[in-house]
Amino acid sequence: MTGENQRVDASSSPFAVPAPPTAPAGPGRARRLASPALTLASAGLAFAYVGAVDPNEPGHYPVCPLFRVTGILCPGCGGLRSAHAFAHGDLITAFGANALAVVGYFVFAGFMILWLVRAYRGGPTPRFALRRPYWWAIGVLALVFVVVRNLPFGSALAP
């Protein structure tokens, strides 16, 4: 019996190609970009505030407790002055206030660019996972920075 009412089941045909399995739909681009965009906006607002409220004027920000008690400059001392100068585009003054902070600003900027590009393209979220020797190296670098900036010959690194 051949006619219009007879249908051929494609799954029983030897020439049928099964449909590829569909991948589960991931989050949309806007959702992927939300976290890096909010992080970048928060950092931008913090820099805008420090850029608007001058840390060189007394009374706006608290004094470093380590410096107040001991007179020793910690790795963060001069960081707000550095951020203020950086926000105004004065890299020389920013570097003079806290060189370690300026390096941190550029590392943060590179990480944010990587995160935004990966989020836009749908790639994996970048991880800032370093092996233990690298963390030790960063700690030793910060310690050397503190020691040198507190010695007379390292006064160029002091804010």
Image: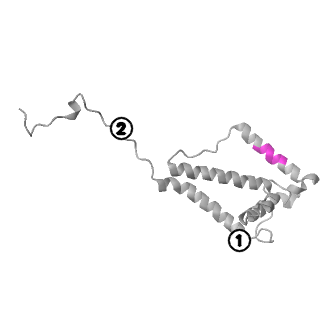
Q: Residue at x 31, y 37 (%)?
A: 19
Measured as percent of width and height from the top left, residue 22 is found at 36, 41
**Sooner in the amino-acid sequence: mark 2 or mark 1:** 2
Measured as percent of width and height from the top left, residue 115 is found at 58, 50
Q: Amino acid at mark 1?
A: Ala
Q: Which residues are magenta?
A: 138-144
Residue 59 visible in the picture: yes
What secondary structure is found at the residue carrying circle 1?
helix
- Asked if the residue under mark 1 is in contact with the one under mark 2, i.e. CB atoms within 8 Å, the reply is no
Q: Residue at x 53, y 50 (%)?
A: 119
Left or right: 118, with 43 as reference point: left
Measured as percent of width and height from the top left, residue 90 is found at 76, 64
Residue 141: quarter of image: top right
Left or right: 72, with 136 as reference point: right
What secondary structure is found at the residue carrying circle 2?
loop
Decide whether the magenta segment is chiefly helix, strand or loop.
helix
Outermost residue toward the top in this view: 14
Q: Nearer the viewer, residue 24 or 106?
A: 106
Residue at the disc numbered 1: 52
Q: Residue at x 29, y 33 (%)?
A: 17
Residue 99: quarter of image: bottom right
Instruction: Check if residue 67 falls in the magenta segment.
Output: no
- Crowd class of label 1 (few under 14; some 14 to 19; many from 20; radius 10 Å): few
User: Residue 105, relative to residue 50: is it above or below?
Assistant: above
User: Residue 40, relative to residue 134: is it above or below?
Assistant: below
Outermost residue toward the left in this view: 1
Measured as percent of width and height from the top left, residue 109 is found at 66, 54
- Crowd class of label 2 (few under 14; some 14 to 19; many from 20; radius 10 Å): few
Q: Amino acid at mark 2?
A: Pro
Instruction: Check if residue 139 falls in the magenta segment.
Output: yes
Residue at the disc numbered 2: 21
